Amino acid sequence: MADESGSPIRILIVDDNRITRENIARLLDFEADLQVIGEAEDGREGVRMAHELQPGVVLMDINMPDMDGIEACRQICLSSPRSRVMMMSVQGDMEYLRGAMSAGAREFLIKPFDYDELTHTIRKVFAADPSPVERAVLAAQEMAARTPAEAGVGHRVVQGIIVAVFGPKGGVGCSTIAVNLAVALSDRPDANVLLVDGNLDFGGLGVMLDLRPTHRMVEVLERFDPDDPFLMQQLLVAHSSGVLLLASPGKPELAELVQPGSFVELLESLRKAHDYIVIDMGSTWTELTERVVELADRMIILVTQEVTALKNGKLALDLPGIKDSSPEKLVLLLNKYNRAWGITPQAVGDFVGRPVASVIPADRPAAVLAANRGEPLLLSTPGSGMVRPLRQLGDLVPGDGQAAREHALGVLPEAERPPSIISRRRPSPEPDRAEEKAAPRKRRGWRRWIPFLRWRRGD
């Protein structure tokens, strides 16, 4: 099998054992449609040669000095996405296999392998359809390389849409919403999505996606070069869904090294290379949060039916950076909704002063299981009641083009709004006021904190 032009499949061999490299090269020399174009003795050299030579297939050993094969595979998948990586190892345990597949490897061969297995696998990998990661990286590189004339409208480079997810109270589910929103957006044709962990102190998006980032926020900012989009792609880590991740600093003491100005400049550059950037801002209001709110095209604010979350949500909507935003920009999301608790989305909207645009039902077992497995809930638990509303949330994010940008999140025409999950129980009759004055009752529990929940007779 040759490529579309009829040329042989170009192969790069990366292995620290010289004899192994030579033996593989001799075997492949018997095949007219396979051509070895280079050999590298460690992962770092393999990444460099893959970028220079652009092979169709890279045969990569796992255990190598300086840079191991898994990290080299991850970097090649980001910097040279057209080069498909095949991992080779004498170790066949599941941990190696899982690490290789997570890094973007297309196949895993256990040494020693026979001649027919090697050649058949090379041809199969080369002929395979592009993976979600490959499509996402190629699209990101294409966007980053566009000139203003190629971008079209107004001779401006088309910029991706930034969606910031903010929960004024901890535990309302910011990370779960951000991860699954990014996965939902990645399902759009040819969409490349970047997920940014803006929770600088205790961000855990890497854990939720079962990724082990080599490069984190601080290093990315140190090496940031707006004129080198390919370098920036190498500093990200890819998930099997096609979503790219920019991880948090990893340690709370490193959070202060991320300056708001530098962070915003980085986002401005990255939005030129991605269709969507979803940022998990956590629950802390800082100067950086305020700067991101100003930059974002859409701002999703999370509340739950918990009284303290409602109180903080109301306060957040009154913050200068949010209060002054256009109504089209803000989306109020009611997360972990349970109709048995009695607090309806309508009541929440009345209290905070903004209608609820989206409702995600509570399914704690599914959410915890997905997080512990390191898999987005949309992919790991398709039967959960949270799946459909999460995908509907992705549908609310505008697509490409100015018209889609003006199609505001949360202010859709009535006919286009997704059905809200609202309690259908008929409210209890309003108590008799004269009788209440004669024998006043002491309010207990949550009723003493939120008088807006007094039931009213339905129309």
Image (tube, rainbow, N blue to C red):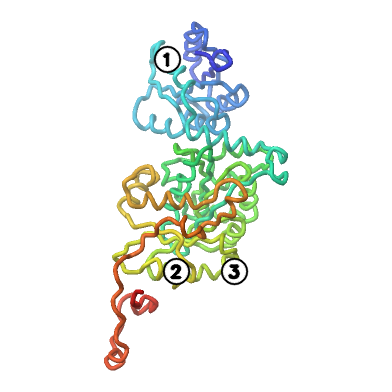
Image check: 230 left or right of 73? right
Local SS, label 3: helix
Residue projecting furthest to the bottom: 438
Q: Which residue corresponds to mark 3? A: 320
Looking at the image, which residue is at 47% across and 26% down? 129
User: Given the image, on which type of amino acid does mark 3 rest?
Assistant: Pro
Q: Depth-wise, is mark 1 or mark 2 nearer the camera?
A: 2
Amino acid at dot 2: Gly
Return the mark for residue 349: 2
Mark 3 and 1 residues: CB-CB less than 8 Å, in contact? no
What x and y, as percent, mark residue 66? 53, 29
**Above or below — where is 129 with respect to 348?**
above
Write the residue at 54% across / 71% down: 318
Q: Which of marks 1 and 2 is nearer the N terminus?
A: 1
Q: What element carries label 1?
A: helix
Is 390 placed left or right of 262 in the picture? left
219 shown above or below 316:
above
What's the CA distance linking mark 1 and mark 2? 60 Å
The location of residue 94, given as percent across then percent down, is 34, 30
Q: Which of marks 3 and 2 is in front?
A: 2
221 over 32 or under it: above or below: below
Q: What residue type is labelled 1?
A: His
Distance, label 3 to label 2, CA atoms, is 20 Å
**Residue 200 in the image: x percent, y percent?**
52, 54
**Mark 3 closeness class: few <14, some 14–19, many ≥20 residues within 10 Å:** few
Label of residue 120 in the image: 1
Tell me whether the residue at label 3 lies in contact with that at label 2, contact meaning CB atoms closer than 8 angstroms.
no
